Every structure is written in structure tokens, then in C-alpha cells.
Amino acid sequence: LNLKPFPTFMGYSSRLMAESWESNNLYWARLADESGYPPAMLHVLIPQLTRRMVEKIFATHLEDWPALLRALRETGEEFRQGKVASLPKTSSPSSL
């Protein structure tokens, strides 16, 4: 994710924002894979990581894309260090 932030464009800013949030899911999936989590855990990990990222955003205006990227990277680093989303790496069948 070593890209320049996307600028907002008149009526297209919401679309760009939506696309940028979707690219976060790809980043979270890569981190989960690097950490040995099975793909089935993404439905639990992604909401937790996204919530944590949103907590870290400190943006002063709509075009503050560096704030979003900074929050994404900080959350990813916390995840790598085991400070966020501590879940078992293998899913076991439920005993229901």
C-alpha cells in the first residue's frame, strides 16, 4: 500500500471512499494470512480490525487520506504485535 492518497472529486468522493474501505479488507486478509489465520476467521477479524482503525483516525477534513492510511498501518502493526484481535488461529468444530 505504498500509494499516494486519492484526492476527492466532486460527486465521486463517496465512491472513492467506498473503494478505499474495500481495499482495507484486502490488507486485513493479507495480515490474517501472514499470521496463520484461516480464511473463515476473516468475518470476525475484519470487523474488529476496522473498528480499531476507525478509533485511530484523526482526520481534520474529508481529504485527509493520510490520516486513514496512517490509522490502517498503525492498526496493522498492532495486529502483527498481537495487541489486537487475539483469536485462536485454528477453528474447531462447535460442540452444539
Image: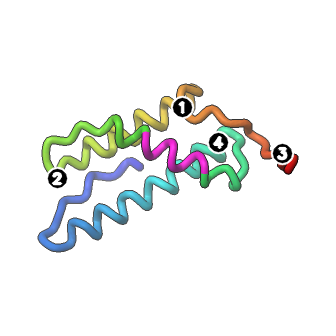
Q: Secondary structure at mark 2?
A: loop
Q: Amino acid at mark 3?
A: Ser
Q: State left or right for residue 25 relative to residue 85.
A: left
Spot occupied by residue 64 in the image (x, y as percentages of width and height): 19, 47
Q: Which residue is mark 4?
A: 34
Callout 4, which amino acid? Glu
Which circle's residue, 2 or 1, is located before the other in the chain? 2
Which residue is tagged 2?
Answer: 63
Answer with mark 3 or mark 4, whichever residue precedes in sequence: 4
Instruction: For marks 2 and 1, give the CA distance.
Output: 27 Å
Q: Find residue 31 and report its horizontal and vertical position in percent.
A: 58, 43
**Magenta part of the chain:** 44-51
Frontmost of labels 4 and 1 is 1
Q: Position of residue 90 (x, y in %)?
A: 78, 42
**Of pointers 1 and 3, the one earlier in the residue sequence:** 1
Residue at image mark 3: 92
At a point 25% along the width and 44% down the height, the residue shown is 66
State the SS at label 3. Answer: loop
The disc placed on residue 84 is 1
Secondary structure of the magenta portion, mostly?
Answer: helix
Task: Report, in whole angstroms, how far the alpha carbon at label 4 lies from the one at label 1.
Answer: 15 Å
Numbered disc 1: secondary structure: loop
> At x 41% / y 33%, what residue is drawn?
74
Residue count near mark 2 (Cα–Cα under 10 Å), binned few <14, some 14–19, many ≥20: some
